[in-house]
Image (cartoon, rainbow, N blue to C red):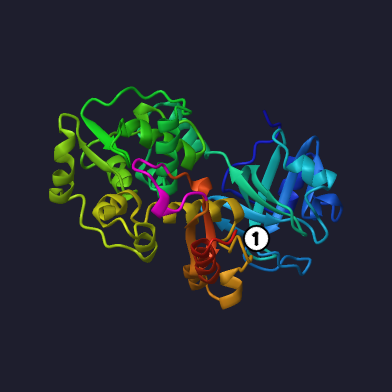
Amino acid sequence: MSIYSFQLNQQYNRSEIRAAVGLDPKSKGGSIDTGYVQLNGADFVFCTVGGTSRTGHNYNNYFEGKDLIWRGKTNSHIHQPTIERMTGADAEVHVFWRVGDRDPFTYAGLGKAAAVWDETPVRVRWRFSADQGLVKLLRSSKRLPAIELKKIGQDHVHQAVQLIRDGSAEHQFGPSTDYDLIDSDGVRLPPKAVFGLAARLALGFDVLPGHFTAGETSPCFRILRRAGYQIVPKEMQDESINGFAEDSQDEPALELSEDDREWVEGRPKLIRHLVRERAKGLAQAKRLRFKRDHGKLFCERCKLDPVEFYGSIDGEACIEVHHSETQVSEMKQGHKTHLDSLQCLCANCHRLVHKQLKEGYPT
């Protein structure tokens, strides 16, 4: 347990921080005025978000959700002893941030390095544990607020389904009683177990059966269906499922995206099924996971950064998703696609790869 007791989201000036760590609050300069420092076995990070720091540097620190994407000092790199220590599994890193170089710092909490990029200056994704109010809520086994459940993305749901299908997911959810989630090849899974595991992936802590409810009007079912999965009454026979999906008001007809048109090409009888499984699902899940892992979208083949190249976030539209292991035309019935078997490619490289595959060239 930490010897420090900073309050989450509370503002502190440097003199208050000095006093809290046992230093003279009136002193100036020294290691605590740098971007990061170790004191009494704990590390402290001070950074400016979205602007220029007092030293005149702008390393483009920014929040992505609740994660902080942060850069170290000018010449820092992944193999420096300080960086290796701070990003280690057992590190205690207190993170403070501000917008203006004269503003007080806001305490973001204890950060854990969720990703470290081999760049200079080094880039780290700091992930923070649940805030104290949420921890108390979890300990009391009360319902999670809707604002927390909305953080569960399509990629989290897709990964949860894969983990349960593979038998590699440990959870405290029992078999379904009233409803089933229908997987891509018709396998029935317990919706609460899928949602609970997806919530754990999204929120970073164990989500238990008592933390949310299921049912037709619940956020649980809405989020699972938005990810492209059907939720049907348990007594419904398999041969009735397609008709149920067509008639369900909660499952509106979905248009084929450009990605989905390519993925299902040549298999028209499966279009509706695949769209429901992936419609803004599998391709979007890959993009979300890739951006979460790397901090941005870029082409894995030519390394094009579309936002930098086009000068706008709209440039991300040129990053497409490619099956790098099994082409759609070669997939057998019941084929399961994992996110790791997909690639993010720019439109040019994507078309080049498909032409090379068509002509028998190695890619």
Can residue 183 be seen from the camera position used here?
yes
Query: Between residues 51 and 7, which one lies in front from this camera angle?
Result: 51
334 inside magenta stretch: yes
Q: Residue at x 52, y 61 (%)?
A: 357
Can residue 137 be seen from the camera position used here?
no
Note whether 157 is above or below 52 in the view shown.
above
Q: Residue at x 20, y 40 (%)?
A: 216
Predominant secondary structure, magenta span: loop
Screen quadrant of the C terminus: bottom right
Q: Residue at x 33, y 32 (%)?
A: 192
Query: Between residues 175 and 318, which one lies in front from this camera angle?
Result: 318
The location of residue 203, given as percent across then percent down, is: 48, 40
Give left or right: position of 323 versus 144: right
Region of the chain picked out in magenta, as a range: 325-336
Q: Residue at x 58, y 63 (%)?
A: 298
Q: Amino acid at mark 1?
A: Asn
The location of residue 241, given as percent across then percent down, is: 18, 40
Which residue is disc 1 drawn over? 61
Hey, which quadrant is residue 299 in on the image?
bottom right
349 inside magenta stretch: no
